[in-house]
Amino acid sequence: MNRSRKVIITGASSGLGLALAEALLRRGDHVTLVARDRDKLAAVCVRLRQQLAGARLEQLPLDVSAAELEKTVASAVAAMAGIDLLINCAGILREGYVEQLSEQDYRQTFDINYFGALRMIRATLPDLKASRQGQIVNIASVAALTGVFGYSAYCSSKYALLGLSEALRAELKPQGVKVQIVCPPEFDSPMVDALDQTRTPENKAHTLSIPKLTLAAVVEDVVAGMEQNHFMIIPGRKTRLMVLGIRHFPALSRWLADHRIHEVYQGPP
Ligand SMILES: NC(=O)c1ccc[n+]([C@@H]2O[C@H](COP(=O)([O-])OP(=O)(O)OC[C@H]3O[C@@H](n4cnc5c(N)ncnc54)[C@H](OP(=O)(O)O)[C@@H]3O)[C@@H](O)[C@H]2O)c1
């Protein structure tokens, strides 16, 4: 078995972040779980301690969009005596026609999805460098690779996260820190349950042109991908095929998307 790692996962009280925390705890890693809602996070940690006897886990209630998080993060790192792996999974989604999203929606999405990851990286970087196996995994989306109807705020933030990850991969490799990005398609999670209450029909038709995955399938591919040296981890075989199409036949992929959208188009009121 590989050596146990010291891990911080943001967005770890729900969905993918929680499922990854559970998988890494089962592997024997020491994991600090980060999320904003203190009570929900505490309840999740109680459940994990009950289910996984002997698991080493800490809870860190924190808003990754808070400007000054360095001290709080530093004490969490000190409590684990270092950090080997940072997983930036905290994310929010604001879907809607551009006319209906507010500037605040765009700013909030960037503050959490992009600046939240950047702040966590900057706060942990000295300790990641000090680790002999420092690793950063940023959870983006297929929406970092192609424009999606209704995701003007979300896509922009995930494209920015991809740009950050690409630049940091090159910059941190010589310093011994591995940077990876995960681009999943839609999967079952509380985020998607909430989206389903309000999403535009065009978004649903466009997004689901890539088949939805189960959370378990995403976790399996992410955990396997983290062990390898690929920069980009794309969960699901069909997703990887679709991404090949998006990359090599962009005009065809836009034409197919336009066709799907046209079939259900309603537009803003
Ligand atoms: N679900 C999908 O279909 C899908 C597809 C592709 C990519 N993704 C990406 O995968 C990641 C996880 O998505 P999910 O569906 O698992 O989401 P989720 O179930 O809604 O969980 C989001 C987590 O992030 C935390 N969070 C949100 N804002 C935060 C902040 N400012 N500071 C700290 N924690 C924060 C939430 O807890 P609190 O609210 O208590 O803070 C929660 O633990 C996201 O980055 C998302 O963009 C999701």
Image: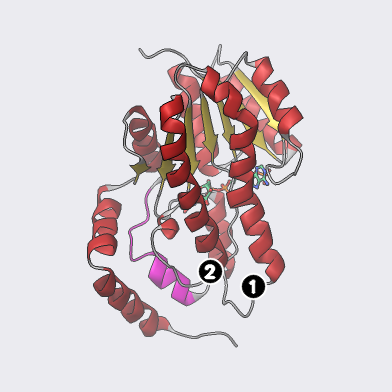
Start-end of magenta stretch: 201-213
Asked if the magenta segment contains residue 232, the reply would be no
Residue at the spot 41% in from the left edge and 82% down from the top edge: 264
The residue type indicated by label 2 comes to Ser
The residue type indicated by label 1 comes to Leu
Within-10-Å neighbours for mark 1: few <14, some 14–19, many 20+: some
Nearest the viewer among 224 and 218 is 224
Residue 31 in view in this figure: no
Asked if the magenta segment contains residue 202, the reply would be yes
Q: Is residue 45 above or below residue 267?
A: above
Taking the image as shown, residue 185 lies to the left or right of residue 89, namely left
Farthest residue to the bottom: give it: 269
The secondary element bearing badge 2 is classed as helix
Q: Position of residue 116 (x, y in %)?
A: 63, 45
Which residue matches tag 2?
A: 152
Q: Position of residue 1 (x, y in %)?
A: 35, 12
Nearest the viewer among 78 and 142 is 78
Taking the image as shown, residue 229 lies to the left or right of residue 172, namely left
Splitting the image into 4 quarters, where does residue 251 fall? bottom left
Within-10-Å neighbours for mark 2: few <14, some 14–19, many 20+: some
Which residue matches tag 1?
A: 101
The answer to whether the residues at label 2 and label 1 have Cβ atoms under 8 Å apart is yes
Q: Is residue 246 above or below residue 10?
A: below
Q: Report how many numbered discs are placed on residues in the image.
A: 2
The secondary element bearing badge 1 is classed as loop
Disc 1 Cβ-to-ligand 1 distance below 8 Å: no
Q: Is residue 269 above or below residue 142?
A: below
Q: Position of residue 142 (x, y in %)?
A: 40, 56
Q: Is residue 126 above or below residue 110?
A: above
